[in-house]
Image: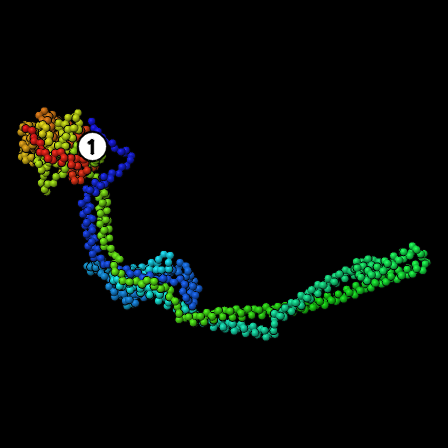
Amino acid sequence: MNTHSEKPNNNEEVIDLGAYLNVIKQSKWKILGFAIVVTLLTIMVALTLVPKYVATATLLIESEQTKAVSFDEIYGLDSTKKEYYLTQFEVIKSNSIAREVITKLNLKDHTDFIAKPSLTGELKGMVKQLLPFLNKKESSVLTEEEQSEREMLGLLAAFKSRLSVSPIRKTQLVQVSFESSDPKLAALVANTVGEVYIESQMRAKMGITQQASSWLNTRLSELRIQLDSSEVRLQAYREEQKLVDIEGIAGLVTQELEQTSKQLVDARATKNNLESINRVINEYGNDNIELLGSMPEITSHRVVQDVKREVVLVERKVSELSEVYGPKHPKMISAKSELATVKTNLNKQIKGLITGIEKELNRTTRTVNALERDLAKIRAEYQDITRKETQYNQLKREVETNRNIFNTFLSRSKETEVTSDFSSAAARFTDRAYAPRNPSKPNKKLIVILAFVASFGFAVVMTFVFDALNDTVKNKNDVENKLAQRMLGLLPHVAVPKKSYFPIHAYLEDTYRRFAESVRTFRTSLLLTHLDRAHQVIAVTSTSPGEGKTTTSANLAMSLAQMGKVLLIDADLRKPTLAKRFDIPVFHPGLSNLMIGTEQLAECVHVDTQSGVTIMPSGQIPSNPLELLSSPRFAQLLSELKAQYDHIIVDTPPTQAVSDALVIAQSVDSVVYVVKSDITRIKPITAGLERLFEVKAHVAGVVLNKVDMSKSKDEHSHGYYDYYDYSQQPEKPQV
């Protein structure tokens, strides 16, 4: 009854950290060796590296400087903006600054800037010398200036590769650093770059100041001429027009024009009123005193009103007297005579008013005509004065404009002349560079440490990669999971001298106790595989030659010989090896002779006295081994031998080489498949097993041979053998 341990669900991926650690453990010496070799090489390279020193100077870029001329106005550059500082940083890194520093310090003769012959260049030169036809390009002849410029370009490239300009965030500070193998040179160059930058900016500003001064003077002369010309024109116009106070004259004319216009309006209003009254008078008639007296213009007159009041008083007097006296009474006659006189006076006053209205109308008409003539005259005079004033103001404005511009340029020119020899620095040093004591690079310790860590990590990764690409069988899990077969046992790898075979009686020797214990474990596992099935005849095969199936067959036979009578048959009729391994003469008859019938069983076997195993060599190599093994005689022979031996072990050819093993497998009780650990690939193994299954052979399981016990994680290798049997003597064969 087989028991299986609980396993996780196939759908769940389980990361076996132990497996990864085991992979590392197996290759620990390779990993460590690779890391050590790489580290040693790195140390050798690091020792040859030239130390580099970095010196740093700090500059303060001034955002506002004392200046005679507004350069921001000339260039349109705002010194308060970010672009200003970025521009200054690029100026510091410019080729012009670098050229001046190189020339000033004569860096072309310094060892740091002298081109050293490179390995690539030397190889190219050697190739060109050996193969001159490859150099088909004609070399151009350079002038001295061109050659000098080419050298300067090379120096610029080398210089700028070592120069670093780094602004400090949120400040006006910038760090100028230079790298060199000479610490003093590094400090000198860093300081010189700052000095050259400051000097170049001052020169530029001085040049701009002088240029501005020259331009201002030229422009000032032009403006003076313009001002003089405009003043001459203004004075000439004033004299021509005889203008003393044009503004006062214009004011008087304007006032007179307003007054005359007002008088004309009043006169026209009076005229219109009189004309309307005169039209009514003409309609009524001059003799119709009664209608004329009813006119509002007449009745409203004061004299008429006074006379009418007198008429009313007299009429009231007559009315009162008529009530007392008769018509012929003197008082009545006197009163009536007074009434008639008053009425006559009223009519007279009305006629006088009518006549006065006609006269007033005539007079008002004459006044309106006169005012209209005066207004036209004044308007003409006003227009003339206005034209003169306009022209005068234009000339005056031109003079004032030219005078203002001239005064502005004159003031700027005077300031420029006074300050032309002064210019404030665009930057200043806050910290000068000093020769560093310690190199900035290379950090040899860090390089060595990183090399070790990197090489170690690389070796570990490659170990995992090679392990993932390795499709061989290495342990019990590979047998069960990749081959889907039972693990019968594993045989440890035993080192033997080159060009020599593993001892065939290793099972019986004290030197190979671990191996012997492995064989006993394999034997026990084989016998317990199927207790309900006989394992009397056992065939041993493998995928390819050299996997140790013959050694496995012989040692399995020796272990079984301790339990009973065992026959070991060499069924490899093509390349037999058992006879040679057991020191049996090559001419000794064997399996082929017995099957053909030329020899008897007793003549075809050999008893190994050391192990007690009966050995049947292959005998004479036949021309048709497959036909011989597939004949009914082979199966009949195995049946006859079962009666004489407790166990029969058949050593067969590999499954992938020939089909002999497949034929033999049909006649045996079970087949043991030998796999060489970490050598044989899975695909040919599965192909061999499939061929056995196709012929319906009973594969008892797999034996993993030549296992490196120091690398194996199988439970058989964890002190199992040492604990139980390494101190014991090997079992003695039964007699």
Residue 259 or residue 627, whichever sits in front: 259
Q: Position of residue 366 (x, y in %)?
A: 75, 67
Q: How many marks?
A: 1
Left/right placement of residue 63 relative to residue 595 reads right
Q: Position of residue 275 (x, y in %)?
A: 76, 61
Q: Position of residue 118 (x, y in %)?
A: 22, 59
Q: Quadrant of the N terminus?
A: top left
Q: Residue at x 19, y 52 (%)?
A: 40
Residue 117 or residue 270, whichever sits in front: 270
Q: Residue at x 49, y 70 (%)?
A: 407
Q: At numbered mark 1, what does the secondary structure look like: helix, strand or loop?
A: loop
Q: Is the residue 314 above or below the residue 225 in the image?
A: above
Left/right placement of residue 735 relative to residue 483 reads left
Residue 380 or residue 651, whichever sits in front: 380
Pointer 1: residues within 10 angstroms few (<14), some, or many (20+)?
A: some
Residue 306 or residue 581, whichever sits in front: 306
**Residue to which mark 1 is pinned:** 485
The answer to whether residue 573 shows anywhere in this view is no
Q: Quadrant of the C terminus?
A: top left
